[in-house]
Amino acid sequence: MFQIRIHGRGGQGVVTAAEMLALAGFMEGHKAQAFPSFGSERTGAPVVAFARLSSQEIRLREPVLEPDVVLIQDRTLLDSVDVFGGLKPEGYVLINSSQSVEALGLEDLARRLPAGHVLTVPATRFALEKIGRPLPGAGMLAGFAAMTGMMKLESVQAAYNEKFSGRVAQANAEVAALAYESIIRQLGGEHA
């Protein structure tokens, strides 16, 4: 089973991103599950959502405490939330930022994990360019796909096409493509 934890802030589409990840995984033949962790969150408050992908039925219903992947939609959470808590030794970390891993002060984390497992992608910048709103979900999921090889870019795009229509679906597909290519370039042109 592959477990994903998504950290962000209220209003960034964290819950939608988890749902889209599960839908994209389902489209590729995985058993999939997504759910949020709700409290008294308001716009701007830290939010977390979870997803699981498996080849077998998923019976777990609790939060993801030992993730294979951590997606961080808001880099300001690095200083206020234990976003890396429980991360598996071979885990992946993708941070929504235009800054490098080194500029974010995460060299130790990058050294601790396998090469190419800690990356950044400017998902919000891509979203502002294409959608006109700071909704990094499609970019983060496409980055996840490129980084892990768990799914194809087309599956991420198809999931957004399933949930949205017209210009919104097209804009998210464009954000996903930009993010996917960004990660592939960082990995030297290959999947992880």
Image: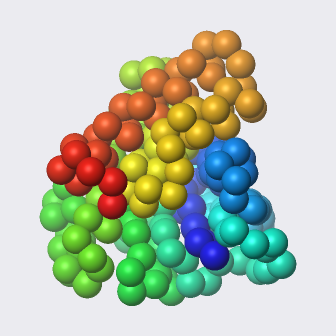
Image quadrant for the C terminus? bottom left
Q: Is residue 5 above or below residue 64?
A: above
Judged left or right of residue 169, residue 32 is right
Image position, residue 93 (x, y; %): 39, 66
Camera-side residue of 61 and 128: 61
Judged left or right of residue 25, residue 163 is right
Camera-side residue of 87 and 157: 157
The image quadrant of residue 155 is top right
- Identify which residue is drawn at 16% across, 60% down: 103
Decide if residue 140 is in sight here. no
- Identify which residue is drawn at 49% across, 39% down: 153
Q: Residue furthest top?
A: 166
- Identify which residue is drawn at 42% across, 76% down: 91
Decide if residue 137 is in sight here. yes
Image position, residue 89 (x, y; %): 39, 86
Image position, residue 174 (x, y; %): 46, 24
Image position, residue 90 (x, y; %): 38, 81
The image quadrant of residue 1 is bottom right
